[in-house]
Image (cartoon, grey):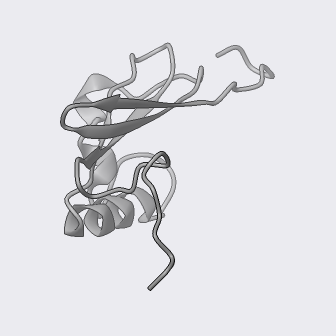
């Protein structure tokens, strides 16, 4: 990303036989390959002191949901959040509110 250039975040959803995957990506500088797992650690790399990604991964894992970073360094970050089949309600499912 060139200094002063605006990031363009994009969100996509894909369904597969194993569940649904949410993709969040931008066109920033990305995460170096050797740091992709470290950003999810309690004491992650970088200049911030936040625990957001660590806490996010921990909370999601309780329900079987996974999050990974799969972006290409120099081309932007890409987070993939996989929600396993059976752990979500599909919007096309019928709802019976006549209990």
Question: At x 33% / y 47%, what residue is drawn?
Answer: 39
Answer above or below: position of 38 versus 3. Answer: below
Answer above or below: position of 98 versus 33. Answer: below
Report the residue that reaches farthest toward the right.
Answer: 4
Question: At x 19% / y 59%, what residue is drawn?
Answer: 64
The picture quadrant where one finds residue 89 is bottom left
Q: Is residue 74 left or right of residue 20?
A: right
Q: Is residue 61 left or right of residue 71?
A: left
Question: At x 36% / y 47%, what residue is drawn?
Answer: 45
Point out residue 55 in the picture as x, y percentages from the top left corner: 36, 67
The picture quadrant where one finds residue 42 is bottom left
Question: At x 27% / y 58%, what residue is drawn?
Answer: 87
Report the residue that reaches farthest toward the bottom.
Answer: 99
User: Which quadrant of the figure contains the N terminus?
Assistant: top right
In the image, 87 versus 63, the foreground residue is 87
User: Which quadrant of the figure contains the C terminus?
Assistant: bottom left
Point out residue 53 in the picture as x, y percentages from the top left corner: 39, 56
In the image, 77 versus 94, the foreground residue is 94
Q: Is residue 38 left or right of residue 88?
A: left
Answer above or below: position of 47 versus 21. Answer: below
Point out residue 12 in the picture as x, y percentages from the top left corner: 52, 29
Report the residue that reaches farthest toward the front.
Answer: 98
Point out residue 75 in the picture as x, y percentages from the top left corner: 50, 13
The picture quadrant where one finds residue 5 is top right
């Amino acid at each position: 990303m060139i200094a002063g250039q605006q990031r363009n975040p994009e969100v996509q959803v894909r369904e597969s036989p194993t569940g649904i995957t949410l993709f969040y990506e931008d066109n920033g500088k990305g995460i170096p390959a050797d740091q992709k797992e470290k950003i999810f650690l309690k004491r992650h790399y970088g200049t911030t002191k936040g625990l957001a990604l660590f806490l996010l991964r921990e909370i999601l894992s309780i329900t079987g949901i996974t999050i990974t970073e799969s972006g290409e360094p120099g081309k932007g970050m890409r987070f993939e959040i996989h929600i396993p089949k059976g752990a979500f309600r599909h919007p096309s499912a019928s709802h019976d509110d006549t209990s």
